[in-house]
Amino acid sequence: MIGCKKTNLIMDKSSIKSESIFDTIKLGENIAATLKRGDLLAIYGELGSGKTTLTRSIINSKFFANDPNNIIPSPTFNLIQIYEFNEMIIGHADLYRISNVEEINALDLETIIDEGILIVEWPERLNQIIGSNVLNINFQLKNDNRIIKLSDGGGWQERIASIYI
């Protein structure tokens, strides 16, 4: 991929330095290669930090939509988007506007995890993280770069290592 140098991505065993949108897209493609039914990606970070860019790159990767130009809107206003692929669904939830537990329950996030993969922006709005296969992804803005930290919330310890390859 143009503009993405593997050596610039890795900072340490749990952090990635993204110097450009291309680095974030490459990380998304690497994460997509490791996903399986029942996974939850909990993506933390400030507004504009790259959460939706990462999500788009996962959904548009060769493992799912296989179309880098596919339009993936942010679900900020409708709260959730569902994408159906051959044998799997991906739910993309943005909980920024959620104000109470009833709104979260109405989204039926557990069913999405049972049937596929759930990607949640602003997961801190959940009372508790659902699912047993949770990858925590934390975006931090530092100067003109994004520092992206991956951590195992359950079921991801071995897979995290393969994301950095």
Image (cartoon, rainbow, N blue to C red):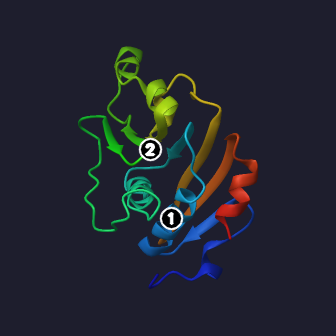
Label 1 vs label 2, nearer the camera:
2
The residue drawn where x is 47% and y is 60% is: 63
Residue at the spot of label 2: 87
State whether residue 98 is above or below residue 2: above
The residue drawn where x is 51% and y is 70% is: 26
Residue type of the residue flagged with mark 1: Glu
Which residue is outermost to the top?
102
Left or right: residue 118 versus residue 150 is left
Please, what secondary structure does the residue beneath circle 1 have? helix
Total marks shown come to 2
The residue drawn where x is 49% and y is 35% is: 123
Measured from the top left, where is residue 56 in percent x and y? 38, 57
Residue type of the residue flagged with mark 2: Glu
Left or right: residue 100 versus residue 35 is left
What numbered label is drawn on residue 29?
1
Q: Quadrant of residue 67?
A: bottom left
Q: Residues within 10 Å of mark 1 (few under 14, many from 20)?
A: many
State whether residue 8 is above or below residue 109: below
Left or right: residue 45 versus residue 93 is right
The residue drawn where x is 56% and y is 58% is: 31
Left or right: residue 70 versus residue 164 is left
On the rendered image, what quadrant is the C terminus found in?
Answer: bottom right
Please, what secondary structure does the residue beneath circle 2 have? loop
Measured from the top left, where is residue 77 in percent x and y? 23, 37
C-alpha distance separating marks 1 and 2: 19 Å
Residue nearer the viewer, 113 or 99: 113
